[in-house]
Image (cartoon, rainbow, N blue to C red):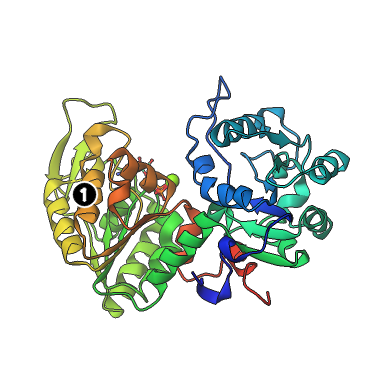
Amino acid sequence: MALPGGIKHVEELAVEGKRVFVRVDYNVPLDKKTKQITDDARITATLPTLKHLIGRGARIVLGSHLGRPDGQVKPELSLEPVAARLAALLGQDVVLADEPTGDGAKKVVSDLRDGQIVMLENLRFDAREEANDEDFARTLASYCDVYVNDAFGTAHRAHASTAGMVKFVAEAGAGYVMAKEIEVLSRLLGNVERPYVAVLGGAKVSDKIEVLDALLGKVNSIVIGGAMANTFLEAQGKSLGASKVERDKLPVARNFLRKASESKVTVHLPTDVVVAANLDDAEGSKAVSVDAIAADAMALDIGPVTLEAYRKVLAAARTVFWNGPMGVFEKPRFAAGTVGIARALAENKLALTVVGGGDSAAAIAQAGLADKVTHVSTGGGASLEFVQGLDLPGIAALRPGK
Ligand code: ADP
Ligand code: MG
């Protein structure tokens, strides 16, 4: 049960009759028109932690953000639908305070009985949350005796509720979601079984260059796909036609390829791609060599030859970290590369297989393979920072003697 760095698991905390602040990540997608929650996975993910605390007779104070209100009270970003959904899932009342802090919040917290739950209003309605303001942090801390963080998705942010308040609370620990993330992701930083292969794809080299650089010191090979591969291919002198390419990142891409070869890390790039004139080109999509991309064609997925080569690399791997789809997987015609990579991870039963990133997690869920890999991280940016070996403020704050 012991977590790296001496971080306590929620099961190790004495919570009976105590007020326990739980930082959750209820930043759920809402339908623009109806304001209904379109996916409640972030709420259901916290149920083990909440049920544990309810069972122990804790008095639970929930804190979360929703969207980007930027310090303003935005009624459309109220946590009201979230509190209602949580109440339905738990079959018990969830009282929503009408503000993040203040007299109303203080009152609902002081009225709490053992096993009951209150939720503070969207913490980002107050600009002091993201500013990690000390007074705001102290006020949040005054609402509890014990602090639990179960919001891995915001652990890379040093905000009042994720980091600042923790030093003002006597006891702190990780909820089930956070504990699992720390446990599995830490294995990627330790003595991993080799070969360790990183699969990187998605939209932009500029989003991921820090991860790529950091992975050079850890992995044996890097497999690249998605729009990101286009920039690398163009850096190698290929003509990418009308594909998405970050022209201003060509020197960065070249520099990275040079560093990789110096570090003896093999970089795999596509040898064929699926092209089309546009995303909705039903008839025109076809696989071509990366040396034969027409001037008006866009590369929108890795091709079958590339997929086969990548699947071989992944079959031999004993540790895999995957971030970023291989193509425009949202469109079935350009999803084969991404689904193929998802399958390769699912089929490799000998490897530790970890998927991080919002779109990558959506892609593996869409392929129905999320439960066939070791771990699908609930954090996009947070998982990328973690695998780089960076110390996330929300995790650092949980370490004893912080
Ligand atoms: P993640 O959220 O997993 O970190 P990213 O946000 O970096 O992934 O990238 C996902 C996006 O990249 C998807 O919307 C996908 O459509 C897009 N994408 C992938 N390959 C291509 C491509 N060849 N051309 C244009 N867009 C692409
Ligand atoms: Mg994304």
Locate the C terminus and report the quarter of the image it occupies: bottom right
Residue pictured at 42% horizontal, 58% vertical: 208
Determine the image quadrant of residue 214.
bottom left
Give the tally of numbered discs.
Answer: 1
Q: Residue at x 63, y 64 (%)?
A: 13
**Are there few (<14), some (14-19), or many (20+) residues within 10 Å of tag 1?**
some
Three-letter amino acid code of the residue under disc 1: Arg
Label 1 C-beta lies within 8 Å of the nearest ligand 1 atom:
no
- Residue, disc 1: 343
As drawn, 342 above or below 333: below
Residue 258 shown left or right of residue 52 in the figure: left
Residue 36 location in percent, x, y? 55, 25
Residue located at (36% from left, 59% from top): 250
Residue 239 seen from this side: no
Helix or strand or loop: what does disc 1 sit on? helix
Point out the residue furthest to the top here. Answer: 34
Corner quadrant of residue 71: top right
Q: Is residue 57 visible?
A: yes
Q: Position of residue 50 (x, y in %)?
A: 59, 48
* Residue 126 placement (x, y as % from top left): 77, 44
Q: Nearer the viewer, residue 377 or 133?
A: 377
The spot of residue 372 in percent (x, y) is: 27, 51
Residue lying furthest right: 103
Front residue of 335/270: it is 335
- Tell me: 146 left or right of 376: right
What residue is at 24 percent from the left and 72 percent from the top? 195
Residue 190 located left or right of residue 310: right
Q: Is residue 146 above or below residue 329?
A: below
